[in-house]
Amino acid sequence: MERDELECFLLLAEELHFGRTADRMRLSRARVSQLVQRLERRVGAPLFARTSRRVALTALGRQLRDDLEPHHRAIGAAVARATATARGIDGVLHVGFSTPPAGEIVLKAAEALHTSHPGLAVEICEVPLSDPYGQLRKGEFDVQLTEFPVREHDLGEGPALLTEERVLAIAAGHPLSARAAVSLEDLSAVPLLTVDGEVPDYWLEQHAPTHTPGGRPIARGPAVTNMQEALTLVAGGKGALLSAAHTATYHARPGVAYVPFADAEPIGYGLVWRAADNTSAVRAFARAALKAATGA
């Protein structure tokens, strides 16, 4: 059934008058008659009883009307909801952040949106280390500011908003802790803590590589699920942690030294969202986050 046939049938079933139906559809009476006849040919029987004085539904017409009306209303409501979601930026936007510097950008963006879009409330929450994309996929987050790279076919991403150098968190008594800087080749001299959870292989290799750039194997240390657990093990000499420079500021603690790398690529952070749900609210937040990150 074509959409124009459906609309025409339901309107005529309501009005029971070709003239009023034509007016509501902004068509000629002849066109309305053609649409009805085309649908009746498709069905294989008359849907309306027509005389020179009145129009009435046949029994088959009443059956078709009763079957179609609920679905037609549901389709209209679904389209209306989708349109409102796409155009509107009211409601609640759930935003995740993976590190304290990312959280600061998220907070600044949320404050800016409170002024520019007062109908949009922003709720923020930390992204679990052990499940970097799970809450986003479940719809618990609408967008999140997190480490790159992200190589997930169902997730979209924006440009890098923040970069920072990498450091090695290591027990204060370890020989590497006295260095002014370490190299990636030095990782072969200490076990690296790994992450236990729903983490992609490429993500894990970024945070806990198995070999140095020169091909030397890197021993695996215990698996952790959060930063506090990781630093407790580091302080206890159970392994080292490959981390970002902010960790020395936000997670300073006795027994842990933070040594910068001389040759590691910086870590980039950017916004990630479900590719199928790039809504107006998400786009508004992305613009606010870019301004917050660049100071523009």
Image (cartoon, rainbow, N blue to C red):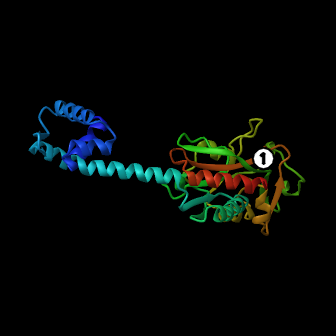
Residue 122 appears left or right of 42: right
Q: 176 or 275, which is in the foreground?
A: 275
Residue 234 appears left or right of 122: right
Residue 107, picture quadrant:
bottom right
Image coordinates for residue 4, horizontal then vertical, percent? 30, 37
**Residue 41, can we see it?**
yes
The quadrant of the picture occupied by the N terminus is top left
Q: 38 or 266, which is in the foreground?
A: 38
Per the image, label 1 sits on a secondary structure element best described as loop
Task: Work out whether 133 lies above or below 93.
Answer: above
Residue 175, picture quadrant:
bottom right
**Residue 127, can we see it?**
no
Residue 121 appears left or right of 65: right
Image coordinates for residue 11, horizontal then vertical, percent? 25, 46
Instruction: Farthest residue to the right: give it.
Output: 180
Image point (84%, 57%), residue name: 177
Image point (83%, 62%), residue name: 173
The quadrant of the picture occupied by the C terminus is bottom right
- Name the kind of residue labelled 1 in the image: Pro
Task: Work out whether 124 lies above or below 56.
Answer: below
Name the residue beneath numbered marker 1: 266
Image coordinates for residue 170, horizontal then vertical, percent? 78, 58
Q: 226 or 65, which is in the foreground?
A: 65
Crowd class of label 1 (few under 14; some 14 to 19; many from 20; radius 10 Å): some
Q: 28 or 240, which is in the foreground?
A: 28
